[in-house]
Image (cartoon, rainbow, N blue to C red):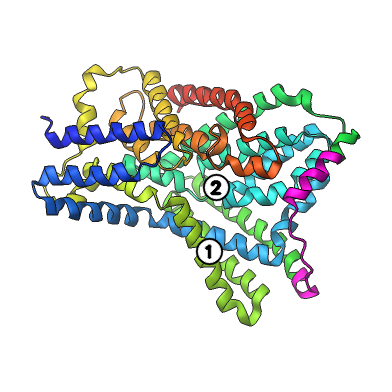
Amino acid sequence: MELTISHWLYGFFTLMIIATMVFRKGVVLPTLLGTFVIAWVYKGNVVEGFTAIFNANLVAAQELFNIFLIITFMIALLHSLRDLGADQRMIRPIQKWMVNGHVSFFVLVVVTYVISLFFWPTPAVPLICALLVPAAVRSGLPAMTAAVAIAIAGQGMALSSDYIVQVAPSLSAKSAGIDTAIVADKSLILSLITGGVAILLAYLFYRKSIREKGDPMNEQDARKLQSTTAAKNEVRTRHLMAWSKLFSIFVPLALVGVVIYMIYTKLSVGRMSGLEGGDGAAFIGGVAVILLLLSTVAFGRQHALDYISNHITDGFVFAFKAMGPVIPIAGFFFLGSAEFSGSILGVEDNPPGFLFDLVQSTQEFLPQNALLVGMSILVIGIITGLDGSGFSGLPLTGALAASLQTGSIDSGTLAAIGQMGAIWTGGGTIVAWSSLIAIAGFCGVSVMDLVRKNFIPVILGLIVSTIVAVYFL
């Protein structure tokens, strides 16, 4: 089709957004400005430009609000468990498994991965670092190597698939115009491959630094660490101790039961599970709400009505801090899709697909090799992750995935590849200005040194997973 000045403006602002990400600056301003200018030029009316800004954010908020809800409920549940002390009880027995530094490395990987899948790594990291890292250091694992294990397993492997909460695959799938389950399943496979390669390489690179369990330096380092990461050890009544023990067992069993049920319905032959994509996240969220109700009543009794309101409010605050900037960014890239641009611009017939049209117009000049396309999406994902968020680039990589798909590689695979690049980078493994700072702080190590330790294992893991995605998914 013939490109209009609105198409060229969309391309200009897209390049501006990518350049802004490269310089590690926020991209909300150019996305809002771009939405206004493009709508104004397309409709030929400045009033329509103002209206489009609001509509773009409204459409994005409507499409993504389920994400805010699931984050809210999971964080609220974690806070209610913290009131009871059940969060600490859930992982304290794991300390017994840390018989030496080598075993401790993999114990940290597994525990961080599982907890981060359900509660996200950002709220899970303080708990893990306070209770497990000192025990790991006592067993001979250096604090730096412990930080590497936590970053790769949590900020990288768990967050990049986000298979339980499904924030990341929802963002990618919405922009690509495909079902969330498609991206979620493929991103889970790619995250495990990337993480498996990165964890193995990290262990092989740094295993010589692991000391014997009886080394005097272990206890010395552990004491220094505990002065920074010591968890609250509040005096609790017998009533709360009993509920704390109960919920430390009941909550993990309930969440594991949810996952088993979801897997069962997905694998059942000839049965529509109804729990894929958004429905799966809704199921998890609903269970989290009931667990929240029970734990809040157990802790607060007659004050439960106030406590649960506070927890949900705190959950919403966390959700909007984490995901709020994504709404205007998603709105801009929704404007580039014909599926959403009609609602944003008020066009009912033949709404424009600015981004898709731009890519289609250059199709003859683009390489048709699937590996080159996959690597290109990976690099774009990594670039978008340089802002230290990880999630802000998913609307872009998802939209590009829909535009760049070919007969040899589909949009779901490309969206999953872009998601890997964006979140492994900005989610917190190889840029120092991300949430990786929290891990470094709790483990008492330099964040720049941690970035250097993570860089080669993570990049090699991303390259391997992209090759696998192109030829086998």
Q: Say which of 397 and 249 sits in front.
A: 397
Q: Position of residue 386 (x, y in %)?
A: 46, 33
Residue where numbered disc 2 is placed: 263
Q: Position of residue 283 (x, y in %)?
A: 49, 58
Q: Quadrant of residue 352?
A: top left
Q: Residue at x 24, y 47 (%)?
A: 340
State which region is magenta. Answer: 220-242
- Main SS class of the magenta portion in the image: helix
Q: Residue at x 75, y 53 (%)?
A: 230
Give the residue type at disc 2. Answer: Ile
Tell me: 174 left or right of 192. Answer: left
Pick the quarter of the image with the C terminus: top left
Q: Which mark is residue 314?
A: 1
Identity of the residue furthest to the bottom in this view: 302
Q: Residue at x 77, y 37 (%)?
A: 104
- For the question of whether residue 380 can be seen, the reply is yes
Give the residue type at disc 1. Answer: Asp
How far, Cα to Cα, is label 2 from label 1? 31 Å
Q: Is residue 316 magenta?
A: no
